[in-house]
Image (cartoon, coloured by chain):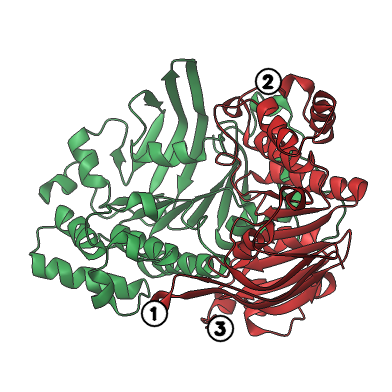
Amino acid sequence: MMIDIKDLCITFGAGNHQIHAVRNANLQVAEGDSYGLVGESGSGKSTILRAMVGINARWTGSIEVDGNTLTPKRTVASRKHMQMVFQDPYGSLHPRRTVDDTLSEPLVIHKMDKREDRIIRILKEVGLGPEFRFRYPHQLSGGQRQRVAIARALILEPRVILLDEPTSALDVSVQAEILNLLSDLRKTHGLTYIMVSHDLAVVGHLCSKIAVMNRGEIIEEITEEQMRTGEVEHDYTRQLWTASHGYDRAALESFREFA
Amino acid sequence: MNEMFTTGLSSEPPTDEPLVSVRDLHVRFSTPKGPVHAVRGVSFDLGRERLGIVGESGSGKSQTGRALLRLTAGNGSINARKMVFDGLNLMRASEKTMRGIRGSRISMIMQDPKYSLNPVLTVGAQIAESCRRHENISKADAKKRALAMLETVRIREPEKVYNLYPHQVSGGMGQRIMIAMMLITNPQVMIADEPTSALDVTVQMQVLKLLDDMVRERGMGLVLISHDLQLVSSFCDRVLVMYGGRIMETLDAKNLDQAQHPYTKGLLNCLPRLDGTHDDLPVLKRDPAWLTEPEHADGGLS
């Protein structure tokens, strides 16, 4: 198993105001696989990614990546193997740094050599020409920015990439391009993905296994086959699946809240 | 204040007459980088129906909606051969007449309730204000109407919600509050600009159902502006597909799979499908000729 998470619990706040953002999450992802996390806002899906990558250190349970047990405290070397792509390409790139600066920084931190070669090569891989190297984010479109964000994650040659809603801010035609790029990169580099999205169709397109989350709990794990047919166990999953098929007045009558 | 609404308006229009009729609408902006021609000759009619306007960012769909209310930004100009609402020429109407129409007879729901609600007023006060601004009624009556409206948009415990501030409500509830605010004046036409894009899918459906109810029960005309072609086609009666400020194609929503225009087909094909495979998605190839070809520009109208 590339990723093995057991009994992951994440809480925010303390005392009466404590919020259990993630409760006893368990998930396993094989090497080279692509795993999806879907759920509505506040279900805890992004919180899992943030704990994995080390942005949030307040968690209990065990996270094992590539045989190494991760602790809340990380070393520089351990961060190299797992990188993250964020949702909003407008907010995740420094507005006053060129693409070259953005891509150099991780190389400097991790003391990697042949920086120029690596930057040129990675830009080509994500489908940007060398002319983009000295541009600022405001000179790029949303899709191009997201390509830079993917290049930044990929330049450290990680084994695992965590994708937090990588296409939700993009137009559908650009979304298709980015999804194709992500699936090509996974094949060529043998990467392992965990992808978070609220869009069942997007996750289903990229992932072979999908965990459905509601209020901090993984309520069901479904396969791509179940995704196609809609033969799922849990009522919440079925409701999500129905809603993802567009407006259906009759089906709406049966919708309810799941606590 | 009431006489303002009646000046220049025909009383009850015949039902087959469209509520809004637009011909050859242009919206231009002058920017420091030169002129931008955002909407280029759009024509359509709106009856008591659900009309969808679909397009990608920059296609001019929102500007088309805003032009109907003459809410175009200061550096923009609107031109149209005809832009008529219920017998009233919107191009010629005075600013005073427009103020009487906006929010009262034509309402608009904005995309993000977080930025469209006033953060320092309770949501109830905002809904009641919308009512008092357009009708000459007492504060107590306005509050009663606002509470009734909150119930209509399926908010539990309206009394409690009435006194909440926008930051205390969730996104879905905020959007319902926006809708309540816009519906309380009983408008004839509603322009909804991406009303559900920020919401979870199940909440999205519930909000759409509210709008659907208004069209069915009150005979309202609804313009739903969205980037989501599948959603719009499952909800609306007719869909206008826009690209580069022009209408590429007008479709009956149920005949979406028979779309003729390569842009519409491209948009449909590049969507990942629940029952699809992991193969690469077809990428949309844009043809510059779409912006010059004349036949679809009028949306199938002469």
Q: Label 2 is placed on what type of residue?
A: Phe
Residue underneath mark 3: A254
Q: Is residue B284 above or below residue B170?
A: above
Of residue A34 and residue A233, the one placed in the foreground of this image is A34
Residue A259 in picture, x, y percent from top left: 52, 83
Q: Answer yes or no: is residue B109 visible.
A: no
CB atoms at circles 1 and 3 under 8 Å apart?
no
- What number of labels is visible? 3
Which residue is at the front of the view, A13 or B134? A13
| Residue kind at label 3, given as amino acid type | Ser
Query: Badge 1 sits on which subunit?
Result: A
Classify residue B151 as left or right of residue A181. left
The numbered dot on residue A134 is 2
Residue sitting at 38 percent across and 40 percent down? B68
Judging depth in this view, the residue of A27 and B123 nearest the camera is A27
Label 1 vs label 3: CA separation?
A: 34 Å
Residue hosting label 1: A16
Q: Colour of chain A?
A: red
Q: Is residue B223 left or right of residue A204?
A: left
- Give me the residue at 60% from left, 29% from top: A137
Q: Is residue B299 above or below residue A158?
A: above
Q: Secondary structure at mark 3?
A: loop
Residues at badges 1 and 2 in contact (C-beta under 8 Å)? no
Determine the chain carrying the residue at label 3. Answer: A
Give the spatial CA distance, label 1 vs label 2.
Answer: 51 Å
B122 or A60, nearer to the observer? A60
Residue B135 located left or right of residue B210: left
| Residue A6, label in figure | none
Q: Which of the chains is green?
A: B
Residue B155 seen in the figure: yes
Q: Earlier in the sequence, mark 1 or mark 3?
A: 1
- Disc 3 residue crowd, few under 14, some 14–19, many 20+, Cα 10 Å: few
